[in-house]
Image (cartoon, rainbow, N blue to C red):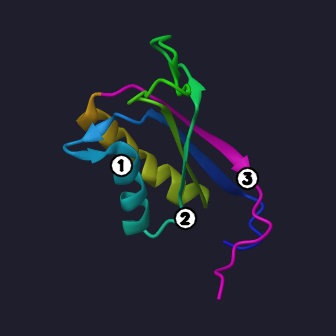
């Protein structure tokens, strides 16, 4: 994976309240990526956003939102990313949730485990 100029970035935009059974969808996505041996995954929680339904989700000081935007990002080879999108689609079908999935070019400069 190191120094891979043809890597791909899979970016999955979902809601914090999206669940597969009792498990948050973002957790299910990360654990499935790990199970398939993808290089790694990062989940980021947004403070504000809206999607296809045009409903704005926000985290304000005196207000607690239970459906903040979440972004799951995974970088790996195109072959592994495309194969994983099938699992992503299956999980979306299970949750009946909306979302956005993109694949972008990524150039891996460094990919190395720490001590």
Say few, some or many: other residues with alpha carbon within 10 Å of mark 2 (under 14 / 14 to 19 / 20 or more).
few
Q: Is residue 60 above or below residue 32?
A: above
**Magenta stretch holds residue 108:** yes
Residue stretch rendered in magenta on the structure? 97-115
Q: Nearer the viewer, residue 46 or 85?
A: 46
| Image coords of residue 46 (percent x, y) | 57, 35
Question: Along the polypeptide, which appears first: circle 3 or circle 2?
Answer: 2
Where disc 1 sits, the SS reads: helix
Q: CA distance from mark 3 to mark 2?
A: 14 Å
User: Which residue lies under the disc numbered 1?
Assistant: 87
Q: Nearer the viewer, residue 115 or 98?
A: 115
Q: CA distance from mark 1 to mark 3?
A: 21 Å
Question: Along the polypeptide, which appears first: circle 1 or circle 3?
Answer: 1
Q: CA distance from mark 1 to mark 2?
A: 16 Å
Q: Is residue 95 above or below residue 110?
A: above
Where disc 2 sits, the SS reads: loop
In the orientation shown, which residue stands out farthest toward the front?
62
Left or right: 87 in relation to 52 = left
Q: Nearer the viewer, residue 53 or 83?
A: 53
User: Which residue lies under the disc numbered 3?
Assistant: 106
Where disc 3 sits, the SS reads: strand
Q: Looking at the image, which residue is at 43% across and 28% down?
A: 64
Q: Looking at the image, which residue is at 45% across and 53% down?
A: 83
Question: Along the polypeptide, which appears first: circle 1 or circle 2?
Answer: 2
Left or right: 112 in relation to 89 = right
User: Which residue lies under the disc numbered 2?
Assistant: 40
**Magenta stretch holds residue 94:** no
Q: Is residue 106 above or below residue 89?
A: below
Q: Nearer the viewer, mark 1 or mark 2?
A: 2
Q: Nearer the viewer, mark 3 or mark 2?
A: 2
Which label is found at residue 100? none
Quadrant position of the N terminus in the picture? bottom right
């Amino acid at each position: 994976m190191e120094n891979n100029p043809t890597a791909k970035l899979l970016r999955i935009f979902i809601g914090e309240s999206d669940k597969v059974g009792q498990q948050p969808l973002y957790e299910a996505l990360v654990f499935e990526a790990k199970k398939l041996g993808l290089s790694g995954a990062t989940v980021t929680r947004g403070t504000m956003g809206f999607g296809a339904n045009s409903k704005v989700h926000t985290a304000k000081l005196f207000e607690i939102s239970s459906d903040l935007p979440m972004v799951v990002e995974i970088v790996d080879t195109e072959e592994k990313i495309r194969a994983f999108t099938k699992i992503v689609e299956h999980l979306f079908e299970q949750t009946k949730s909306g979302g956005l999935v993109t694949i972008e070019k990524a150039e891996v400069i460094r990919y190395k485990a720490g001590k």
